[in-house]
Amino acid sequence: MKQSFYDLNYSDLEAIISQNNLNHSAAAVLFNWHYKKKEHTQCQDKIAKCSLAFIEDSFDFSLPEIDVVHESKNDRTVKFLFKLKDNHKVETVLIPFNNKYSICLSSQVGCAMNCSFCFTGEQGLKRNLTTSEIVGQFLQAWRWLASNRPGEERILNIVFMGQGEPLHNFDAVKKACEIFLSQHGTSIGVQKIAISTAGYIPGLKRWSQEIPGVNLALSLHSPFAEKRNELIPINKKYPLEEVLTYIDKIPLNKKQFITYEYILINDFNDYLDDAKELGAMLAGKSAYINLIPFNSFPGSRYERPGLDKIEKFKDVLDTYKIPTLIRMAKGDDVLAACGQLNSKN
Ligand code: SAH
């Protein structure tokens, strides 16, 4: 069976090229063609004929198919539903900012974390995505922009904040990052990639060695164990205090910080005591807080607090001198906002 080209990082490809005695420049030529130029056709750049035949016979260049595209009417958010080879589906979101985009990638079909406030959790975990299915979301979204919004095919940030717990699929996510970072390919700066986690310690332990420099976001949501257990069940296995000790060990450069995401849920974790405890917990760390007013979805059990409560919560955090942003939803008219991704149909 052919191997997916998009499952290979640059050194994997180089190894295959040299094992098969092909011209060693072929790896750079192929990465340039498929990732820098983002061509989907057979490579037309300078590769010897015999190498082309080998490449054709060895690699599969197919990508996840775009099944449905939802374009928000309120902003320029685009949500893609991708169909995978085994008919599973995942979603990817392009989030606009100043005519550029961030892409929010999925890492798993469904998710095993079962957080009580998240639509994806209701699907359960079906399987991990492969590296090619992760990289494929990016390439297909880029191509969609090139044909549908020409001149706007600028995806400057990559966030692993779609479906799935990225650290629960560490190997595939890591390899996808290596491909994004490769100077022969998309050459995205490490500071432009962020991975969000519910606090999956086995992945945090590997972070510094294996994905150094990548930005980390933690879904914190409550400083209190009882509440966090209810929101994020793996908090019982990997408690927040322990998660924070691992995060504190991750080296940051001078300009870098850890993002702490905090969903605000009406009359649950939006009290001033919650804000004070959160502030005290993060004061003095290189921290940045994203307050995310809860986004509802069909059947959701929580509500979003009113704006004045949200602002008061932020005011408390300001007294702890922690930079805090209230992140209003984008694309929620097409269920593309945080926590609204669900692709089981
Ligand atoms: N599993 C990872 C990656 C998902 S990121 C994680 O938990 O971090 C998606 C972000 O959206 C997380 O911060 C998540 O907590 C948040 N989220 C999930 N459901 C939400 C909802 N209904 N409203 C607002 N944010 C939500």
Image: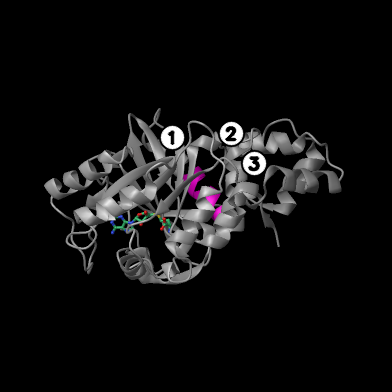
Residue in the picture at 20% in, 53% down: 272
Q: Which amino acid does label 1 sit on?
A: Ala
Chain-order first, disc 2 or disc 1? 1
Residue in the picture at 28% in, 47% down: 291
Residue 120 place in picture, x, y as percent: 37, 64
Q: What residue type is labelled 2?
A: Ser
Mark 2 sits on what residue? 187
Chain-order first, disc 1 or disc 3? 3
Residue in the picture at 21% in, 48% down: 313
Instruction: State the quadrant of the C terminus.
Output: bottom left
Label for residue 146? 1
Magenta segment: 132-140
Mark 3 sits on what residue? 42
Quadrant position of ligand 1: bottom left
Residue 160 place in picture, x, y as percent: 46, 50
Predominant secondary structure, magenta span:
helix
Dot 2 beta carbon under 8 Å from ligand 1: no
| Above-or-below relation of 49 to 198 | above
- Give the side of residue 118 with respect to residue 109, left or right: left
* Mark 3 touches mark 2? (CB < 8 Å): no
Q: Which of marks 1 and 3 is in front?
A: 1
